[in-house]
Image: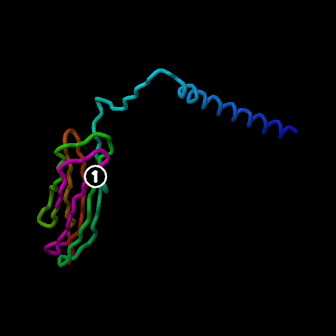
Amino acid sequence: MKTRSTIQAVFGQAVFGLFLFALPVFAAEFSTEQVSVESRDENATAFVHAMPAYYDFGSVKSSASRMTTITFMNSSAESIPYFTAYCMGDLSVFSCSSSCFQLQPYGSCSVMVTFSPRNGDGFMKSVTVQGSGGSTFASSQVFGTDTK
């Protein structure tokens, strides 16, 4: 009997909690007062991620090339006008191409990065893929080893 009364007490609390939860919704549904909700924060700024933040091509022979995509993602409801993406670093073995000019709210743009080793020296090479616009900035590091 003790188990049954405990179940009834828990069930009763759950029903009572459901009633309290539903009460404001029920009251708001019949309210004659007009309510306007504005979710835009005037001080909000856009936030951009570079994905992946790090990418390693590994060892690539000097006669071959490899390609990957770095994606810049706007994770906010704010548009980012004049967004540009570019590469800095060892551009003798890396090339980058992008058509990023603006990031729409929750939008993305991609940068194609190609690693084409030249001399098989065994050294790790790197390039930084950067994206910026307005007051936002994100970057990704890309690596590759030039092997024979």
Determine which residue is flagged by label 1. Answer: 108
Residue 50, compared with residue 65, is above or below; it is: above
Amino acid type assigned to the residue bearing label 1 in the image? Ser
* Nearer to me, 71 or 32: 32
Q: Main secondary structure of the magenta part?
A: loop
Q: Is residue 39 above or below residue 94?
A: above
Q: Would you say residue 123 sits in the magenta stretch?
A: no
Which portion, as a residue range, is magenta? 97-122
Determine the image quadrant of residue 113.
bottom left
Q: Secondary structure at mark 1?
A: strand
Between 6 and 42, the residue placed more toward the observer is 42
Residue 98 locus on image (x, y percent): 18, 58
Whole-percent x, y for residue 64 in the image: 20, 77
Residue 121 on the magenta span: yes
Question: Which residue is located at x 21 percent, y 55 percent?
Answer: 129
The residue sitting at the left extreme is: 92
26 on left or right of 69? right
Coloring basis for residues: rainbow
Q: Residue, x 16% and y 65% (percent of image)? A: 94
Which residue does the image show at 44% across and 23% down from the upper left? 34
Q: Quadrant of the C terminus?
A: bottom left
Q: Quadrant of residue 141?
A: bottom left
Residue extending farthest right: 1
* Residue situated in front as seen by the camera: 70 or 8: 8
